[in-house]
């Protein structure tokens, strides 16, 4: 059962454009949604996260938009740079007593110079 | 500063052979520890987590086992490797649930 879905599978944008990565989930108990960035051959690193009490979280060029009713969120990367080229994973977890972090299938982003 | 060290960096092993992967966390007492598996080009699947020494919980059954012999050490092992065990194994730690997960650099395992 795929509890966290991501789209598109791959995305190519030009330098300076805004990249939009989508994520949806099924479990209504999920209330913590981190996004991880992974470069080839490396472990993922936390990029930005949001809790279900917020509908927007901004950190520099990275913004998460969250729609609890529709169980959807998106990551917007403004002024995309070639160094942003990586795979981005949306993840989700529930707070009460759960130590599981469910990852989506990832979006491979390529930023063309 | 906390550091996470995984060993080995890469392994090529034969089907049916045993395996032991290790992970050490320095600079953090009583961390919550995790093992993740990632197929090439795939998502991250949580395999095990441990809240305290000697206690390990399994998340998925993949013919693997894990142990936490020390507060700062997490071991992943199996007695018989399968082709399907190939992939990227990542050790990780957190301070608590729903906080940032810090990943190691991973071990690339190829089973032939």
Image (cartoon, coloured by chain):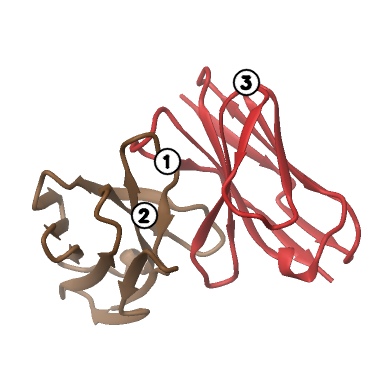
Task: Assign the C terminus of chain B to one quadrant of the image.
Answer: bottom right
Q: Is residue A83 above or below residue B58?
A: below
Measure the C-alpha gap from mark 1 to mark 2.
9 Å
Q: In which quarter of the image is residue A61?
A: bottom left
- The answer as to whether the residues below labels 1 and 2 share one chain is no
What is the chain identity of the residue bearing mark 3? B
Residue B54 picture location, percent across and down: 68, 24
Q: In the image, are marks 3 and 1 on the same chain?
A: yes
The answer to the question of whether label 3 and label 1 lie on touching residues, with beta carbons closer than 8 A, is no
In the rendered view, would you say B56 is above or below A12?
above
**How many residues crowd around disc 2 within 10 Å: few (fewer than 14), some, or many (20 or more)?**
many
Residue A88, horizontal then vertical, whole percent: 36, 64
- Which residue is the site of mark 2? A36
What's the chain of the residue with tag 2?
A
Badge number at residue B71: 3
Label 2 to label 3, Cα distance in Å?
Answer: 26 Å
The local crowd at label 3, few if under 14, some if 14 to 19, many if 20 or more residues have their Cα within 10 Å, is many
Q: Which secondary structure, mark 1?
A: loop
- Looking at the image, do the residues carrying marks 1 and 2 touch, with CB atoms under 8 Å apart? yes
Q: In the rendered image, what is the letter of the chain coloured brown?
A: A
Q: Residues within 10 Å of mark 1 (few under 14, many from 20)?
A: many
**Which one is earlier in the sequence, the residue at label 3 or at label 1?**
3
- Which residue occupies 77% across, 45% down? B77
Camera-side residue of B28 and A102? A102
Which quarter of the figure has residue A100? top left
The chain letter corresponding to red is B
Q: Mark 1 points at which residue?
A: B101
- Count of marks, rendered view: 3
Percent position of residue A64, x then y: 16, 57
């Amino acid at each position: 059962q795929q509890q966290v879905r991501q789209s598109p599978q791959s995305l190519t944008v030009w330098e300076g454009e805004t990249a939009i990565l989508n994520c949806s989930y099924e479990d209504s108990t999920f209330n913590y949604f981190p996004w991880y960035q992974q470069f080839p051959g490396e472990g993922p690193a936390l990029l930005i996260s949001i809790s279900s009490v917020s509908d927007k979280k901004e950190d520099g060029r990275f913004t998460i938009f969250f729609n609890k009713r529709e169980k959807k969120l998106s990551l917007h990367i403004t002024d995309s740079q070639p160094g942003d080229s990586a795979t981005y994973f949306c993840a989700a977890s529930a707070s009460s007593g759960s130590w599981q972090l469910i990852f989506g299938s990832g979006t491979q982003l390529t930023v063309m110079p | 500063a906390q550091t996470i060290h995984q060993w080995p960096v890469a392994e090529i092993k034969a089907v049916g052979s045993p395996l032991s992967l290790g992970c050490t966390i320095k600079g953090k007492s009583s961390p919550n520890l995790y093992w993740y598996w990632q197929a090439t080009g795939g998502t991250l699947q949580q395999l095990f987590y441990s809240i305290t020494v000697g206690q390990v919980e399994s998340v998925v059954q993949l013919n693997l086992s894990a142990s936490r012999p020390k507060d700062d050490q997490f071991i992943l092992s199996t007695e018989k490797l399968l082709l399907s065990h190939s992939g990227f194994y990542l050790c990780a730690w957190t301070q608590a649930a729903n906080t940032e997960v810090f990943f190691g650099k991973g071990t690339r395992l190829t089973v032939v």
